[in-house]
Amino acid sequence: MYKRLISALFPRRCAICDKAIEEGKYICAECERIVRPIDGDTCRKCGKRLSDSTRLYCYDCSRKIHQYDRGFSVFDYALVKQSLYRFKYAGRAEYACYYAKAANDSLGDVLRELKADAIVPIPIHRRRLAIRGYNQAQEFAKRLSEYINVPIVNDYVKRQKATVPLKLLDEKERKNNLMGAFIIARNDVKYNTIILVDDIYTTGSTVDAVASVCRSSGCSKIYVLTIAIGKGL
Ligand SMILES: [Zn+2]
Ligand SMILES: [Zn+2]
């Protein structure tokens, strides 16, 4: 009775369109038909879908050196834009269950092959955490960790500077804004291979900033996984 009341008051929502759906499902039948993970030719560096399949790298990666080794992403940003917005700003932390399942369905084998020592979610600043109540990257990483059987380490990297939202800045401003934003908070552990996890990848400046501190602390292989990848957000 109590359970039924709860689910009537707080029905499970489709992680894509937010319509109420039946228990035990992550997304509605309609979204199931439309939403497809990235497939086909992708950039060998960041994992973005390539518009020109004769190229190995996307425009961004062909003119920029990244600090990580290889990136992977589940969806094109345009496809899940509204969903990610609710996930991040409207309290829909539970969408993480769907995103992690989708990540495992499309990239699980690839991710397990990396033989990573740890999954490291990109931290958010503690003030932002206090307002939002959760770190969306951490919610996603936590579920993913169960699927691919790699431990999640939340306190390895710390965000010590509250940064301006990157979408408001150009490339150079992004870099300056992120300078000194992250530090390694654990000196008692050493990881060889890690997977950095975030919700959205645009220019890669955030993951580059985190990858570079991880590199100086001894990580030799640094991979990146995001829920969605896109440009010009
Ligand atoms: Zn839906
Ligand atoms: Zn790329």
Image (cartoon, grey):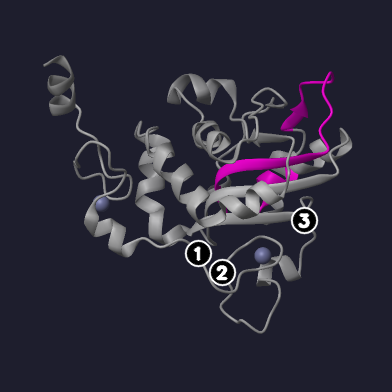
The part of the image, by quadrant, that contains residue 96 is: top left
Q: Nearer the viewer, residue 122 or 131?
A: 122
Answer above or below: position of 157 versus 116: above
Residue 157 x, y percent position in the rendering: 72, 28
The crowd level at tag 1 (other Cα within 10 Å; few <14, some 14-19, many 20+) is many
Q: Which residue is mark 3?
A: 66
Name the amino acid, label 2.
Arg
Q: Residue furthest bottom?
A: 54
Q: Which residue is mark 2?
A: 49
Q: Quadrant of the N terminus?
A: top left
The local secondary structure at tag 2 comes to loop
State whether residue 179 appears in this view: yes
Mark closer to the observer (1, 2): 1
Please give the range of residues in magenta: 181-209
Mark closer to the observer (1, 3): 1
Q: Which residue is mark 1?
A: 38
Residue 170 x, y percent position in the rendering: 63, 55
Instruction: Give the mark nearest the N terminus, 2 or 3.
Output: 2
C-alpha gap between disc 1 and disc 3: 21 Å
The local secondary structure at tag 1 comes to loop
